[in-house]
Image: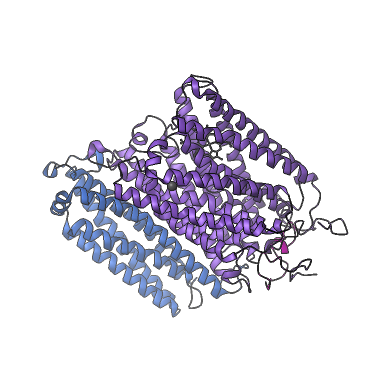
Amino acid sequence: MVPHAEHFGDEASRQDAAHMGMWIFLATEVLLFAALFAAYSLYRLAYPEVFSQAREHMDLALGTINTYVLVSSSVLVALAIASIRKGRDLAAGVLLAGAVLLGITFLCIKGMEYAHHAKDKALPGAHYAYDKFAVPGASLYFTLYWIMTGIHAVHVTVGIGVLSVLCGQALSGKFSAAYHTPVELGGMYWHLVDIVWLFLWPLLYLA
Amino acid sequence: MSLPSAEPRLPERHYLNAERGLWSWLTTHDHKRIGLMFLGMLLLMFLLGGIYALALRIELLTPGETIMGRLAYNRAFTLHGVVMVWLFLIPSIPSAFGNFLLPLMIGAKDVAFPRLNLASLYLYVLGAAITLWGMFEGGADTGWTFYTPYSTATGTAVLPVLLGVFVVGFSTILTGVNFITTVHTMRAPGITWMKVPLFVWAIYGTAVIQVLATPVLGMVLVLVMLERVAGLGIFDPARGGDPLLYQHLFWFYSHPAVYIMILPGMGVVSEAVCAFSRKNPFSYRVLVLSTVGIAFVGFLTWGHHMFVSGASVLGAGAFSILSMLVAIFTALKIFTWLGTMYRGSIWITAPFVYVLGFIFLLFFGGMSGVAVAVTSADIHWHDTYFVVAHFHFIMVGASLMAFLSGLHYWFPKMFGRRYPEAVGIGTAVLIIFGFIATFLPQFLLGNMGMPRRYADYPERFQSLHVASTAGASLLGFGFLIIAIYLGWSLRHGRVAGRNPWESRGYEWLSESPPPESNFHEPMVFTDPPHDYSKPGVEPEVGRAA
Ligand code: HEM
Ligand SMILES: [Cu+2]
């Protein structure tokens, strides 16, 4: 089934437009995070020691596992797109379901980390009361940590929603070798979410 | 101008009567209807902001308290600024005229993503509602700039206002994504990049700025909201944060936003100048390249808002020089428009009078902009009425005049009827004089030291304040007349016919008002836009009989 919009000359130009719109939207997402990375750079320059000591208060193992989880889910999404291009909708649906599960895993692990920080009272802003790391600027580090990973987690949640819908549609046979633009667009979004994490992980856990 | 022989008649079926009932409007995907609904909302917002402008001017009529207390004054100028900037001027020309005209001007049936377009309208309405609810419930008193740390500390209802502006920003982003994609993918055969109408170029440049700058604003608004809710401390010096970060991020958006406000106006003027001088643009290329140039350099000048916030000498100098680059592009445009008019056969109409007002006032606004971009001078003028006058010359003197010019120029296109031209011309002159009377005194006041955002002032400033308030009443009166005669013309205006201005703009090739899908047949465009070089020859029209 190929839904058609009358205002386009043909299906190919419709797909072109959809891809282009998605690329532009992804550019806006990059700029959204750019504001946060600017804030991060500023405070890293202002409090260099805090930012280098902060690493010791992060759970490197969980962060690294999460990186693997997210990258794996991106691989599954890429495979799903490759399958649907060949018209194999069952395989695509299953792969997308796997990606959704990995996304949920990511959020669960992130939640565990948040719980640890909350127990230590390493909370953002005015609620910061972490006694093992009570130097000036430490609360700013944790504030940035919470906001950056928090807003990223919001994006992961949205992405899980998108992928779940696509998974359902793929399993019910909506897509084919001829028509699968939504899967490609959803995949692009998920890859962006993944790439943002690939910047957050070194900045917050390794640096 | 030669009149068509027979009295023209309205086409029987057009986008306004193709479907009937409120529901057909609320669920429409037609870019023309969406543009019209935006126009209605925007005019409503303009009315609201205008009422508050008059209230401010009345308060400033006499020193001391005239009609409102200090907190009420702060809330009033915040409401005026928030409504005028975020809810009126930023969306104005792109969302209303851009939506209506962009597909028509490139021979498309609609924008690339019609449903997204409707979503953008609803987001706008939602955001405006949240903002206004906040303003009337608790009334933020921060000014439209929401500077920290005041905006994170004040007891007034800043939160809903920030949230509303955030939502409106989303609407802007969606519109921008839609327009860029439309221009790239939906141009009809024959419209190569160098044959894209100048208004479309302007809207395209604006959309690029909207898409790249608005997310930064969105994020900084979220940070301020979180700072209020959870006491983040990012902008709070007491917790080691840096309030200047707010200013950097805010102006990284809000300076380009100035070009979101002025570029579409420049597009309108480029169209109208050609149509009413009956001449090809003096240089199409210069107009296009300066549009692109402004869109680009606009991103590199935000620091000029922070000369007195402790910017380094090097930084301030760099921002000062970069700011002046924008003036060069603007001047290029002004010379091109003048060159277009030179030895053209000028046709004085209401849209053209607004164009003249636009060019004259933009010149003043621009020159005062160069003046405040000089660091040493800005230290004197910053936060005085000089700056208020400067930005009103750009925002009202230029952008609003362009908006009015477009409103008159395309009124027959949108509704198929004409307004009384003589009344239109008279009102335009009245408005331009009212404008000068309102804002010229403010330059003098600022230079004498009258600070911005003060409800009170010493006796010796009074005569200039009275002049300004008198001018504002004139302006208000002018807008009232416009509302009356345009409202009247909706039903009773003379039927315009397809192309009452005998314009060569592509949008006039379709009927007025246009049919549902813009053209009865797929269009092929052979002539360049704005081509007046073949007098009397109707441009190639691929229309159904
Ligand atoms: C049409 C007649 C208008 C009049 C008489 C008027 C008058 C005023 C006055 C008296 C103020 C307060 C300045 C102060 O006390 O610091 C003000 C502020 C402002 N106006 Fe207007 N205004 C008009 C139109 C507009 C329009 C169309 C816009 C933008 C689209 C606009 C944008 C602003 C902004 C952004 C501020 C805030 C300035 C600040 O925060 O200091 N105004 N205006
Ligand atoms: Cu600026």
> Which residue does the image show at 39% across and 75% down from the upper left?
A91
Q: Is residue B518 left or right of residue B308?
A: right
Front residue of A86/B5: it is: B5
Chain that is blue in the image: A
Q: In this structure image, what is the colour of chain B?
A: purple
Q: Is residue A74 left or right of residue B167?
A: left
Q: Is residue A59 left or right of residue A148?
A: left
> Which residue does the image show at 52% across and 33% down from the upper left?
B442
Front residue of B370/B485: it is: B370
Q: Up-down: is B71 above or below A196?
A: above
Q: Residue A105 in the image: state x and y as whole percent.
A: 28, 60
> What span is colored magenta in the figure?
B508-531
Q: Principal SS element in the magenta part? A: loop
Considering the image in quadrants, where does the C terminus of chain B appear? Answer: bottom right
Magenta stretch encompasses residue A31: no
Question: Would you say residue B31 is visible in this rendering?
Answer: no
Q: Residue B435 in the image: state x and y as whole percent.
A: 60, 37
Q: Up-down: is B146 above or below A60?
A: above
